[in-house]
Image (cartoon, coloured by chain):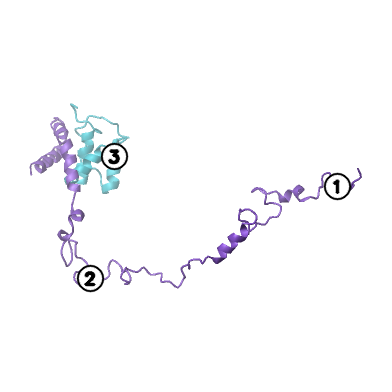
Amino acid sequence: MDKWREGSLYDHIDQFANSLGYENAAIAITLAMVPWESVEDRNNFIGALTGDSPKGNDGQNYVSGIPRR
Amino acid sequence: MAGNQNSGGPRPTAPQNNPANISALGGNGQSGQKQPNYTGFKYGENKALAEQASGASMAQAPTSSASSQMMAPSGMPLGQLTDETNDVSAPITDGVDFGPGVGSSALPGNISAETRSIDNQAIVKKYYPAMVRAAQLKDAPDSYKRFISFLAGEMRG
């Protein structure tokens, strides 16, 4: 991977770790491995879990990987 | 050969010709009654079977007078979780990390052992090298880099 891609494993890790808290790193990594169908699906899950929007990168650095829907 | 003129031939009023006597279960349709005394044993064996059954004493069924309240082995009724303890030597919060009494350190090792943090460390250690490489991408977001820095500190400490 030479570019940071939205919807990649590391993007998922970023979103889950920053949303669930760094102390829940193992859970964040495990959830990042779920084959999320889309970024929106993942974000909806985070929202349901935390009651808040994802706290990871806001997307300004993203190279589009999985399309939002 | 002379015989009865009425013998032989179909008889429309016979029970087997009555459609109402047809049973989906087979041959019990004509009588419509179950035979409670049917045992399935050969003729002549039923008498001995009946004598044996009448001589056997059935175990007494539980009566409704038995107490429906759950009882502890000592005969004392089980209480609620919030009830005062019956053990005068220790408060009810003995073994937990709040309230009076000894904390969870007093529990046996197989109960108090916390393996989750060890499992969590194993997961983090397994993926840490790859996550560090991803953090070195020039467009990796700062939020991700902060997370990796936190993990690096945890790994050192």
Of the residues shown, which amino acid type is indicated by label 3?
Answer: Arg
- In the visual, does B157 lie left or right of A58? left
Q: Which residue is mark 2?
A: B87
- For marks 1 and 3, give the CA distance: 88 Å
Q: Which residue is mark 3?
A: A42
- For marks 2 and 1, give the CA distance: 91 Å
Q: Do the residues under discs 2 and 3 have CB atoms within 8 angstroms?
A: no
Image quadrant where one finds the N terminus of chain B: top right
Subunit bearing disc 3:
A
Is residue A55 visible in the rendered image? The answer is no
> Dividing the picture into quarters, in which one does residue A41 lie?
top left
**According to the rendering, which colour does chain B have?**
purple
How packed mark 3 is, by other alpha carbons closer than 10 Å (few <14, some 14-19, many 20 or more), is: many
Chain in cyan on the image: A
x and y percent of residue B101 in the render? 16, 66
Q: Residue at x 18, y 63 (%)?
A: B98
* Label 1 SS: loop
Q: Of the residues tagged 1 and 3, which is closer to the observer?
A: 1
* Label 2 SS: loop
Q: Which residue is mark 1?
A: B7
Of the residues shown, which amino acid type is indicated by label 2?
Answer: Asp
x and y percent of residue A16 in the render? 22, 41
Image position of B51 with respect to A41: above or below: below
Q: Nearer the viewer, residue A25 or B113?
A: B113
**Which one is earlier in the sequence, the residue at label 2 or at label 1?**
1
